[in-house]
Structure formats: structure tokens, C-alpha cells
Image (spheres, rainbow, N blue to C red):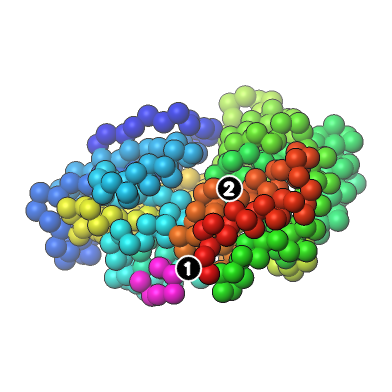
Amino acid sequence: MIMSISRRDVLIGGAGLAAGASLPLAPAIAQAKIEQGATLRVLRPTKFVDPDQAIFNENTEAFTKATGVPVRVDYAGWEDLRPQTAVTANTGAGPDVVVGWADDPHIFSDKLIDLTDIAEDLGKKYGGWYPIAEKYGKKDKTNQWVSIPMGASGAPAVYRESWVKEAGFDTFPKDLDGFLKLCRKLKENGHPAGFALGNAVGDGNAYCNWLVWTHGGYMVDENNKVAINSKETIEALKYAKALYETFIPGTLSWLDISNNKALTAGEIGVTQNGVSLYFSIKNSKDEKTAAIGKDLNHATMPVGPLGRPSEPALIINAMAFKHTKFPNAAKEYLRFMMEKEQYDKWLTGCYGYWTQPLKGYAESKVWSSDPKIVVYRDTWERALWSGYKGSINEAAGTVNAEYVVVQMVASVCAGQATPEEAAAEAERRAKRYYRT
């Protein structure tokens, strides 16, 4: 099995992995009509936590052992994955299976294999899919599954407990006013906030979408009519500007690794991230860094006028392309990777970084292993979707891929546009893709 070397090698090590045991031939695979001579090529995002890639490879090797199907897995940098997926879709060549970003299957849905049978089987077997996972898996306004959501990295607040208490807060604020007061005090104390405002696949979209949604704004309404230019969005952008003034310098160019580095270095007191950041610091071999881990905790991001949590989730969503010569093998590979013997090993070994889309895995022991990570267990329960309140479709995926919301927020924070101007520009850009 060939593994590509990625330019993104990030964080975390030191956790022992269970040895990859030989697995018996699963009944589902034994009954499947896998094509004779089948081989598969898989493309997925590179690791953000070391065990992710190691266990994914072990599970893939177990599939090969169980079926005789050789599988090559290539790993792409996070910013490179979407362009590579587009090339595959548009040329009809390349990987058979792509574990892409959330929206990508909806951009290329007409070029994908129907996965309804395996999705429904997995749902029946493992407690059903979370509603948002089902929404991401099914083609818009149909019951046809075009992808298998594999996991979601949550985006709660990650903060230094001692610094929050030093700022006068016994607990992390649950409302926007309290959050702004906290961030102002943190900056005053020399521990500024830091949230990504660059074109970061995970952190930029997470922060900026949360900001708009929690104020009651949304890109489109239920009928997919562009509605981003609203009073709610304007208020969100005013708040963003005030909050930005509490940030450490440089966040306008931050990518997904930037806040990790800043928190690890003790430069910021609060950010928004997946569980990887906590474990990378907690498990560091450097005593000074490990000491920071003891002071870290997590909380849901503050709730604004929307009245409910509205953190996005960074979702990986697997699809199999029609150009594959081995569609049955591709489908059975996806089924195999979601079965308990493989999936719980991956979920637990990754410390819950890619949280479960199937409800049954909420009982995994990983969620009782450390009380500080329990907030991540309910990622799929809290998450809203790209294109909220409308459909997950090609337009929603493209608007997200073009960073329309991120750039709207960043332009106001940078002083390049007023909130009104930025909202109008986002509306103009979104209407290029939404033609309702």
C-alpha cells in the first residue's frame, strides 16, 4: 500500500495504538460481489493527529487481508484536497474513492455511485445517522445517498482555565456580551484571543460561520434565496470588528495550523479548535508545553440571538466515483471502514478527533476517557450545515469553497469594508452560484 507524503505533518504523538489484528472475512463482504481482480485507489486528507493516518492504514490493510483487494491510499494537504477532488470529478480519472470535505459530494453528485444500500444498512446496525449526517449524505431533496459521512471535527472554544479565572470569570461565558468582555480582559492581561480569519478550511469557516449564525444570519433561506445581506449579518459583522480588536496580530492570514502554534506557544488565551490541539499539548514531551495542557479546557461557543448552539463541524465525507472499474469493491471498502471493528478503533485511537456520524458510536469508551473532551461527543447534535438554512447542494458547496463568509468577515476586521459593504459584496458573490 503506497502512502503519499504530505506537507502537513501536525502534532500529537506518543499514544499507543492497538496492533492491527487479522480480521475474519466479514459476512457483508463475503456476500458482496466484489469484482474479480479489483484494486482501489483512495484519496483523503492528511492526518491532523498522528494516529488518524496510522489506524486508517491498518484498517485499510485489514480490508485487503479480508478481501484480497489491494488498496492504495494517498494523502493530500487540506488546502489541496478540494482541487484534487475537482480534477478527479472533471476528468473522470484518478481515485476510485475520495474522502473529501463536507460539501464536495454535492458539487459532483451526478458523477457519484449510489450508496443508499450501504448507508441504510449501517444506519440500521448502528443506531441511525444523526440528522445533519443524513443531510450531508443524501442528494438534495432525495433519499439517495451519494456519500458516507465518516467523521466531524468539532469546533468548541479551547481556553486556558487559569487565565479565564484571572480575567474574572468562574466559567466560560455562554453569551456574546460576556464573551466580548472576557476577550477584552484577556487582551488587557496580555493573553489575547486568536481566531482564524484566513482561508482556512477548518478554522476560518468554523469561526466565521459560527459568528454569522449565532447572530441569526444565514447565507440563504429555506427556498435557497440568498439572504446574507441582512440586519442580523450586519450586527454579526459589527460584533466581529469589536472582537477582532482583542485578537493577537496576524489572524487575518491564519490557516488551520496557526492557532495551534499560538496556543501551544502560550501566546493566546482562547481559540476554537478540534480536540487535536488539547491532546497535542497534553501529550507533549516538553514539560513546559505539557503544563499548558493541564490548564486547558473546552466549552461550547457562546450563543447569540439564534438561541441555540451553532458551531459548524469540519466534516469528511466519502464518495465513490462512477469512473471506477470496481464499484462493488469501492462500496464494500466504505462499509468495512464504518463497521465497529474498524470504526471504533479509529475513533478511539484518534482521541475523538473525527467524531461519529452514527449514533451508536456515542457509547464509545473514548467519551468517558477524559471529562474535558465530552463536549466533542455531541458535535453532530450541535452542528449547522454549510448553506444553512437552505439545501446542501452545489451552490452551497461552492460558496463555502470560495470562502465567501470568511472573506466577508475578514474584510470588515481589516477595515477594508464597512459591515454594510461587506454584506452586500457577499450577497453579490453568492448570487453567482445561487440562481433561484
Crowding around mark 2 (Cα neighbors within 10 Å: few <14, some 14 to 19, many 20+) is some
Magenta stretch: includes residue 245: no
- Which residue is drawn at the image coordinates 56% and 74% (left, top)? 223
User: Percent position (x, y) of residue 434?
Assistant: 53, 63
Distance Cα–Cα, label 1 vs label 2: 21 Å
User: Percent position (x, y) of residue 322?
Assistant: 25, 57
Can residue 352 be seen by looking at this rendering? no
Q: Which mark is residue 250?
A: none
Q: Quadrant of the N terminus?
A: top left
Which of the two residues, 56 or 368, is positioned nearer the viewer here?
56
- SS at badge 1: helix
State the residue position of label 1.
135
User: Considering only vertical position in the picture, is 290 above or below 78?
Assistant: above
User: Percent position (x, y) of residue 222?
Assistant: 59, 73
User: Percent position (x, y) of residue 153?
Assistant: 54, 51
Q: Quadrant of residue 194?
A: top right
- Which residue is drawn at the image coordinates 20% and 60% (left, top)? 328
Task: Give the left or right position of residue 389, taking residue 345 as reference.
Answer: right
- Which residue is drawn at the image coordinates 34% and 32% (left, top)? 4
State the residue position of label 2.
403
Magenta segment, which residues? 138-144
What amino acid type is highlighted by mark number 1? Answer: Lys
